[in-house]
Amino acid sequence: MDSYLEITVLPDLEADANFLMNNLCSKLHVVLGQIAMGKVGVSFPKYADDGKSLGTQIRLHGTAVILQKLMSENWLKGLRDYCQCSEILPVPNAVKHRYFARRQLKSAHNKYRRSAIKGWITDEEALMKSLEEKPRVLKLPFLQLTSQSNKQVMKVFVEQGPLMDSPTFGELNSYGLSRLSEKVTVPWF
């Protein structure tokens, strides 16, 4: 990942920052799956550690060639008036690295339902256990996206990893994020 570009959303009275970031990342998710699967990373320079916001800017990391190919597609259609895109620039020398990963929680209901399906507990036990368990809540910023396949709205929670001196290499998912188990990094500056 020797190059990057920044996209900043420009909220106004018609569209707030969260709405624009959700739409931007939804469109990015589709094009990353088609063009650059695993080769483009995403970071959020204005990520809030308080768990409330991903900010108004994303940075796309990759090679200059793959970023140019990505931006030559018309994936920003409908958002161009609400976004400001930088040129493709080289990553500065002597940068730190960090990962941005999708973080998911399995619901108690689904966990116990799977146990019942496997025959480890009865359906009644599964229901009782899921009702007894206190729901866990992630306190991380998230994107609210609509699934292209089933049209359900889902939250994609994003965890920002610690700063590291050296990069961790691997493939990124179709959101441009690392798997939590792999902690694939992007340049941080």
Image (cartoon, helix red, strand yellow):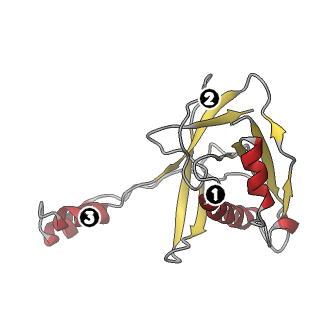
Label number found at residue 106: none
State the residue at coordinates (59%, 67%).
145
- Amino acid at the residue labelled 3: Ser
Instruction: Name the residue that disc number 2 marks.
Output: 163
Which element is circle 2 on?
Answer: loop
**Number of marks in the image?**
3
169 lies left or right of 187: left
Q: Nearer the viewer, residue 166 or 100?
A: 166
Q: From what the image shows, is residue 108 above or below residue 89?
A: below
Cα distance in 3D space between marks 1 and 3: 37 Å
Instruction: Name the residue that disc number 1 marks.
Output: 32
93 lies left or right of 107: right
Instruction: Name the residue that disc number 3 marks.
Output: 130
Quadrant where the image shows the N terminus: top right
Q: Residue 161 location, x and y as percent?
A: 56, 36
Between discs 2 and 3, the one toward the N terminus: 3
- Amino acid at the residue labelled 1: Leu
Q: Residue 24 location, x and y as percent?
A: 71, 63
- Tell me, yes or no, whether the two marked residues, 1 and 3, touch with CB atoms within 8 Å: no
Is residue 12 something that shows in the picture?
A: yes
Cα distance in 3D space between marks 2 and 1: 25 Å
Between discs 2 and 1, the one toward the N terminus: 1
Would you identify the image quadrant in which residue 50 lies? top right
User: Mark 3 packing: few (<14 Cα in 10 Å), some, or many (20+)?
Assistant: some
Which element is circle 1 on?
Answer: helix
111 lies left or right of 181: left
State the residue at coordinates (61%, 34%).
98
State the residue at coordinates (35%, 61%).
107
Q: Residue furthest bottom?
A: 151
2 vs 1, front mark: 1
